[in-house]
Image (cartoon, rainbow, N blue to C red):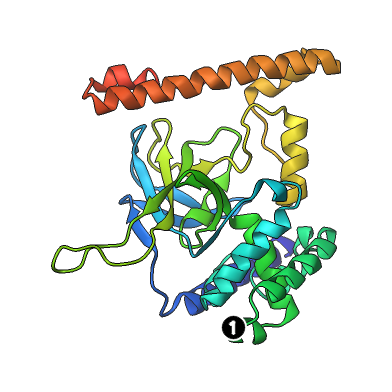
Amino acid sequence: ADTATKEIAESAAVAEASGKDAFWKAGGKSKVDFLLEGVHIAQVGGKGRGLITRDAISAGTVVLRERALGAATIRPEDSDQPIVSAARVAAVVINAGHEKATRVLEPRPGREYAEHPVRAERLNELTHGRKLVRKEGANVHIATLEDEDIERLLLAITINAQGVSGGGRTHQGLFPEYGAMANHSSRPNLLLRGDIAMPPVDESGGPVRGNGELQLVLQAVCDVEAGSELTVSYLGELYLPFAERDEQLREIYGFPADRRASDAGLEAMAPGKQAEGEAIQRLIAANSQASDAWDKAADLQAAGAPQDAIRKHRVIS
């Protein structure tokens, strides 16, 4: 009986979330410029929604190009206060009248936001961010929002926005249609990077006036089997030991880190701070070699080299 009740409750929660998503998406204009055929959003056990591929994907394939709903440049002085960058993104989103479009993101308004595990821990930070948003964007859109609406948006940005480089700068961007649906993994099969999507051309062939928009690009870093989940890393450094990954993910996103096969060996060979530092340096060097190999593979692909020669540079150990 308990199992049946739990299943009914979970089904009701999924149906409620789907209904809210359909409502908030209605009438919205898509910012997705490209989505690989067969890639779709689906429920993933224990994670909520995620990106799944119906078909096999070859290493190097671009999976998604999505323009940001809102974005802001990350300034060096804000590195210790991520809520400041989140507040600037929130102000951009609200000023453009796009706040409702973010309600498809976790946490959704209502019970999901009220009961979110990160909310209580970061309430003071969210309150500070809300004051910054009201100060930065005093207009009709912000005036219609309750304090809780702005704080929910800030938490949604903190959890779902991606930091990407584009145009020579690092930006924080919100990509709610597909980009934000990619779950975290310590062994991701997608690389995320930024690009600047230029305005389209008009019918006469001339460029439309206006600045380019920040665009998220998701690209496969290895061969992906059909039916697999597509994942990215939410952390900037893949070489971090398990304890540090776990601490950061719990603090920022409210979930634990997944373990890698190499974690146990790293922990065993790093009983002290010095040994740990040496092990991390070896991992940094390995990470650098992997990055060089990826660049080499990209050069080979551009030169039209055989796929076998390209693929051997894209194997992630």
Which residue occupies the foreground of this view, 135 or 61?
135
What percent of the width, then of the height, locates residue 276? 78, 17
Q: Which is nearer the eye, 291 or 104?
A: 291
Residue 314 can be seen in this image:
no
| Residue 309 shown left or right of residue 14 in the figure | left
x 37%, y 20%: residue:
296
Task: Work out which quarter of the rendered image holds the N terminus and state it.
Answer: bottom right
Picture residue at 31% right of the left edge, 61% below the top: 199
Numbered disc total: 1
Residue 217 in sight in this render = yes
Q: Percent x, y for residue 146? A: 71, 82
Residue at x 80%, y 12% (from the top left corner) = 275
Q: Nearer the viewer, residue 173 or 168?
A: 168
111 or 99: which is nearer to us? 99
Residue 40: percent from the left, percent from the top?
41, 55
Q: Amino acid at mark 1?
A: His
Work out which residue is located at the far left of the displayed protein and give it: 204
- Which quadrant of the view contains residue 109? bottom right
Q: Height in image: 62 above or below 28?
A: above
Query: Dot 1: few (<14), some (14–19), or many (≥20) neighbours within 10 Å?
Result: some
Residue that badge 1 annotates? 141
**Vertical side of 100 occupied by 74: above or below:** above
Q: Is residue 305 left or right of residue 150?
A: left
User: From what the image shows, is residue 295 above or below residue 137?
Assistant: above
Q: Residue at x 42, y 75 (%)?
A: 28
